[in-house]
Image (tube, rainbow, N blue to C red):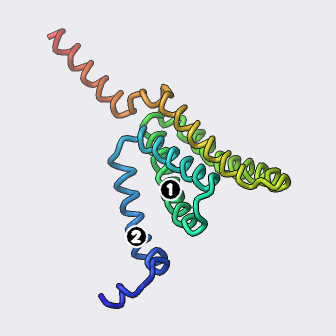
């Protein structure tokens, strides 16, 4: 235990034990909590961190904030995939996978292009403002979106079964 106590935070956060712990937390969070709020929370947390960096947090805090940002975004993708598989019929899953795969590349290319423009005008902080605005705006859109209110495929199946049973009981 003495050996562990002597490690500094950088050593602790770079160990495989920490990675395993984060993966376990992520699995629990992605599976057990409300999808609507997990997606919105990930986006809001990421947007808030980007805003904090743009506004000028002390430099030594940026790596810790960026680690939290990465964790928040790592929760976003599996939760989105869970949402898609629960809400969409199987015939649309292939197309939705392609659409989901293109969003990462599109977003990366867009922010790289914008970052180059911002750097040209000597204002790299605009990249963080852009990410903050995008994350928070998309989370507000997400929370007001009708897709959050759709029943899952499983819920639809259960409703149909209970409706069929109710009709069968009435007929008898």
- Mark sitting on residue 2: none
Q: Which residue position holds label 1?
A: 74
Q: Is the C-beta separation of discs 1 and 2 under 8 Å? A: no
Query: In this orientation, which residue lies closer to the viewer: 131 or 144?
Result: 131
Element on which disc 1 rests: helix
At which x and y percent is residue 13?
46, 74
Q: Which residue position holds label 2?
A: 20
Furthest residue toward bottom: 3
Left or right: where 161 falls relative to 22: left
Position of 40 relative to 120 (above/below): above
Element on which disc 2 rests: helix
At which x and y percent is residue 12?
43, 78
Residue at horizontal 26 percent and vertical 18 percent from the top: 163
Residue at horizontal 61 percent and vertical 46 percent from the top: 132
Q: Can residue 46 be seen in this view?
A: yes
Separation of residues labelled 1 and 2 (CA atoms): 14 Å
């Amino acid at each position: 235990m003495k050996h562990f106590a002597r490690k500094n935070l950088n050593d602790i956060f770079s160990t495989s034990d920490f990675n395993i712990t984060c993966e376990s937390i992520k699995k629990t969070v992605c599976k057990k909590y409300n999808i609507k709020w997990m997606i919105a929370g990930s986006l809001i947390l990421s947007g808030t961190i980007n805003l904090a960096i743009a506004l000028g947090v002390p430099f030594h805090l940026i790596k810790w904030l960026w680690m939290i940002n990465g964790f928040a975004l790592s929760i976003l993708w599996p939760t989105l995939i869970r949402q898609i598989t629960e809400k969409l019929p199987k015939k649309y899953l292939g197309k939705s996978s392609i659409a989901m795969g293109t969003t990462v590349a599109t977003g990366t290319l867009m922010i790289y292009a914008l970052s180059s423009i911002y750097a040209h005008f000597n204002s790299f902080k605009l990249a963080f403002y852009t990410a903050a605005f995008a994350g928070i705006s998309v989370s507000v859109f997400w929370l007001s979106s009708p897709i959050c209110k759709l029943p899952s495929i499983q819920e639809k199946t259960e409703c149909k079964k209970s409706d069929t049973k109710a009709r069968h009981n009435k007929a008898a």
